[in-house]
Image (tube, rainbow, N blue to C red):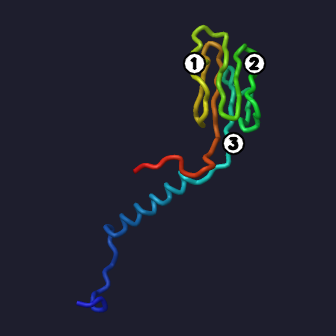
Amino acid sequence: MTREEQPFRKPNLRDLVPIGALLLTALLVFLFTRERNEPLTAHVEQDGKETSVYVLAEFAAPTEITLDNGVTVRLSRDGASIAASPCKGQDCVRTGTLTASGACAVCLPEKTALYLTGGGRSDGVDAVAG
């Protein structure tokens, strides 16, 4: 039987599932690999209220800022950290430098939080699974 002789077959659900999966995969790849232009930003909260916001790209050299409650925050292009605190445990200081969006350091006794937002990828895909 030649191609011209084959009757037209109406598409069924089994034909549409792979096409839908392919389109969904393409959409997810687009959403997770597109370039974002939001700068990495450090937010400082005291007593549950945001008191300061710093764009880290604006710091040419590491800078330390001491808050009213004695907590010292270190800011640089590479990230942000709690450098010193009057609290006993010093867990907030041992957290180290925050470098990625969503990272946070909290000093519970001093009711202070430092967290990062933004920092979209500027160099495309940052991981490949294979």
Q: Which residue is denoted by mark 1 in the rendering?
A: 94
Mark toward the viewer: 2 or 1: 1
- Disc 1, SS: helix
Q: Rounded to the nearest whole Å, what is the CA distance between mark 1 and mark 3?
A: 25 Å
Q: Position of residue 61 (x, y in %)?
A: 75, 30
Identified at 26% across, 90% down, the residue is: 2
- The answer to whether residue 8 is left or right of residue 93 is left
| Residue type pointed to by label 1 | Arg
Q: Earlier in the sequence, mark 2 or mark 1?
A: 2
- The answer to whether residue 102 is left or right of residue 2 is right
Q: Which residue is denoted by mark 2 in the rendering?
A: 66
| Residue type pointed to by label 3 | Pro
- Disc 2, SS: strand
Question: In the figure, residue 40 lies in which quadrant?
Answer: top right
Mark toward the viewer: 1 or 3: 1
Q: Position of residue 103 (x, y in %)?
A: 58, 31
Q: Which residue is denoted by mark 3 in the rendering?
A: 39
Identified at 62% across, 52% down, the residue is: 35
Discs 1, 3 touching: Cβ within 8 Å: no
- Disc 3, SS: loop
> How packed is label 3: few (under 14 Cα within 10 Å), some, or many (20 or more)?
some
Q: Earlier in the sequence, mark 3 or mark 2?
A: 3
Identified at 60% across, 47% down, the residue is: 121
